[in-house]
Amino acid sequence: VPPRRWPLENSEYKRYGRQLIMPEIGLQGQLRLKQASVLIVGVGGLGCPAAAYLVGAGVGTVGLIDGDVVEESNLHRQILHSTARVGMTKVDSAIVALSSLNPNVNLVAHPARLTPESSLSIMQDYDLVLDCTDNPASRYLISDTCVLLGKPLVSASALRTEGQLMVLNNPPLPPGGANGGPCYRCIFPKPPAFETVVSCGEGGILGPVVGTMGVLQALETIKVLSRGVKGLAANGTTSPEPPTLTMFSAYGSPMFRTIRLRGRRQTCASCGAKATVTPEALKSGSLDYALFCGSVAPVDAL
Amino acid sequence: VPPRRWPLENSEYKRYGRQLIMPEIGLQGQLRLKQASVLIVGVGGLGCPAAAYLVGAGVGTVGLIDGDVVEESNLHRQILHSTARVGMTKVDSAIVALSSLNPNVNLVAHPARLTPESSLSIMQDYDLVLDCTDNPASRYLISDTCVLLGKPLVSASALRTEGQLMVLNNPPLPPGGANGGPCYRCIFPKPPAFETVVSCGEGGILGPVVGTMGVLQALETIKVLSRGVKGLAANGTTSPEPPTLTMFSAYGSPMFRTIRLRGRRQTCASCGAKATVTPEALKSGSLDYALFCGSVAPVDAL
Amino acid sequence: MSAEVEEASPEYVPITVEFSGGLEMLFSNERKLSLSIPRRDKDGQKANVAFLIDYLCQDCLKDPRKDLFVLDGSVRPGILVLINDADWELEGEEKYELQDNDNILFVSTLHGG
Amino acid sequence: MSAEVEEASPEYVPITVEFSGGLEMLFSNERKLSLSIPRRDKDGQKANVAFLIDYLCQDCLKDPRKDLFVLDGSVRPGILVLINDADWELEGEEKYELQDNDNILFVSTLHGG
Ligand SMILES: [Zn+2]
Ligand SMILES: [Zn+2]
């Protein structure tokens, strides 16, 4: 399909008018959003609000991947789901809500877990990926795949009363491209010990905490897309903003704190000049993410 | 109705388990949320996400007041509404979405504008108020009513790429109580000139910006309620946190900034020792909010 | 234009001035200015926030709508003035004397929702 | 316990240490400590972040699970160390020499969602 030559339809001017009239978006930005496709990995506490605002904003294609079904204990924070849809896959449940919010968005269902075998083929069709998952093995897998495919990654996490947000691999230069944005492995070269990883099920989670992080993921995604992610990757310019980690603490004072992060790590196994994370290694299963992260239940954790 | 003597039902332990197990909430906090009632004034870009997370968290009673109907131009950011419900009142549309998320919450519909004549009687039944409106006249009216009734006020606003958040009148001591939290008039004794007030319709608004502010309102509400707002008002202790303004700027670096605010202003017309904003003045209409704010279209603006 | 000196000098106070909430539009869309303000006004008094506001109006505010920033010699209602991230009313308002490396932020209140 | 001196002293560096992301649980649920660290270690070298980490383990970490904070003499994988709000890798990591009023933040990575 060739890119659209004409601006938006009348109903689109009406629906998106409030964001169109801002210089930060404009008609050009809105067209970029419409032509863009993003993949949301995990349709839980982060993925629900992120999806709602991206679909609301008129991102052309939104893919959703998750292998779980809706449970009652999800509903205090996973606001796209509903009591009547307990037991439905999270992907299908989210699509009910999202298509009723904005029927103009192309929603793509991937009701399955992301695995090292499937990640390259699933993620290659998207322009940008949101990491809305809940475990370290998935986080390394998604970051590695984003680096291999040259996609920016908007990553967030939350636990109890705290949250963290980073835009990674932005600009998404190939491995060895020193001016590319750092990847997840640049920031965390070694995974945490398995026994120190606390899930939301064990540790608890306050709904608006993970909700805030998910909405901020949608915001960062809109910022990257409306500036033109493809142009950024192609002309190799550096990101307009140096990499940061936004830390949120609901009971902290102040609640938000911004940390300057390092750039790419030359020795990074994923994005460094001598990267060992290759498409072949990924697909062959020789990179055992679960083992790397010290888990005993390999792909189940993803 | 006497307060419940017994803890939660089984299904409530399941639904709220992830927040119950955190020391910041606990069973005591969850019971306080269940016994609490909050009024959300404005079911737009702020009110939609705020309501979703408060209903998700199990606040016992959530009142919604708004005089508008859903328009297509709302949908990019007002995520409780839907394309099929364009033309329905915002209050009714929100109730469809909220009751499907959590049928255990008592939702109270006020499909009308808040006016100086109605604000005292509508707000008196609630424990806490969220200001999710979009104009200065409403903001002064809501704050004045909260001071008169002794209710904490969680106030947010957003425009274009920026947002602001304050918890006001917390603790909600009577006028003259110097240790009470400042009210909106303490911070802004004089309203802005009418010609400088820009609405989201004129200036534009990015969905996740107002969304973030609305989710943060839900968070601040849960923090106040789970600590026990009634106890706070009764024993006159000062707020655990000094008053702050959280400023958000989507394209700023850092995105968030926290400002220390002043305490109550002794000469405040609303919460000061010689307050001129009285229930009688409010009800009689002698306080013309629209005129005070320089508008020519008085109550219509509310 | 003002010189953009960073280090301390006997004659100038280096400060940062920021605008937010739409006020930046009056200042050529600059959100952050690094300024060096004379330490003393023409009467020999130490430069305070009132002096800074005058200075901004004369040297930085190119927009003809100056009355959207100041009115009757004072900052317009609806604009918060923050000195080092605190409401200026905690610091002495217009009489606060500028110190090296102070951050003065002018924020227009937002009302949308 | 360390003395909580605020002003500069010839013998101690006053610093702030913070914990976040769950690490505070190892430090008696204290999120923020005001510490005064000896300026020199026992070999006369200037106190650096490595020295601080040792100091924290010996003087502040009462929890028996010390290996959740340090492992093989170094901060455990999954913990970010931030010096004045910047990744310590931008500042020289463990060799960074502590300055008066530095803020050192230890953050545990979160994985939930
Ligand atoms: Zn890397
Ligand atoms: Zn007041």
Image (cartoon, coloured by chain):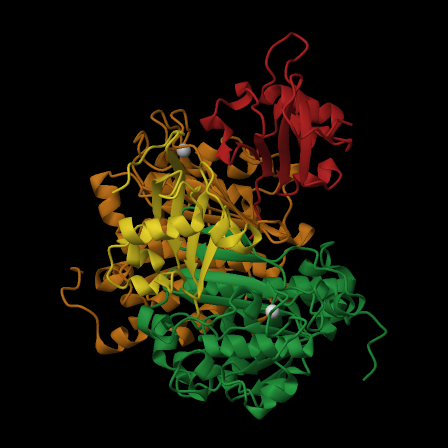
Chain colours: A green, B orange, C red, D yellow
Q: Residue at x 44, y 66 (%)?
A: D78
Snapshot quadrant of residue B60: bottom left
Q: Residue at x 66, y 65 (%)?
A: A170
State the residue in front, A267 or C54. A267
In this image, D25 relative to A34: left or right? left
Q: Position of residue A262 (x, y in %)?
A: 59, 58
Pick the quarter of the image with the N terminus of chain A.
bottom right
Asked if residue C72 shows in the view, the reply is no
In this image, D51 relative to A33: left or right? left
Where is ligand 1, by quadrant?
bottom right
Q: Position of residue B73 (x, y in %)?
A: 65, 64
State the residue in front, A281 or B239. A281
In this image, C15 relative to A27: left or right? left
Q: Position of residue A30 (x, y in %)?
A: 73, 66
Asked if residue C85 shows in the view, the reply is yes
Q: Position of residue A200 (x, y in %)?
A: 37, 71
In this view, B113 is above or below A10: above
In this view, B41 is above or below B8: above
In this view, D39 is above or below B128: above
Snapshot quadrant of residue D12: top left
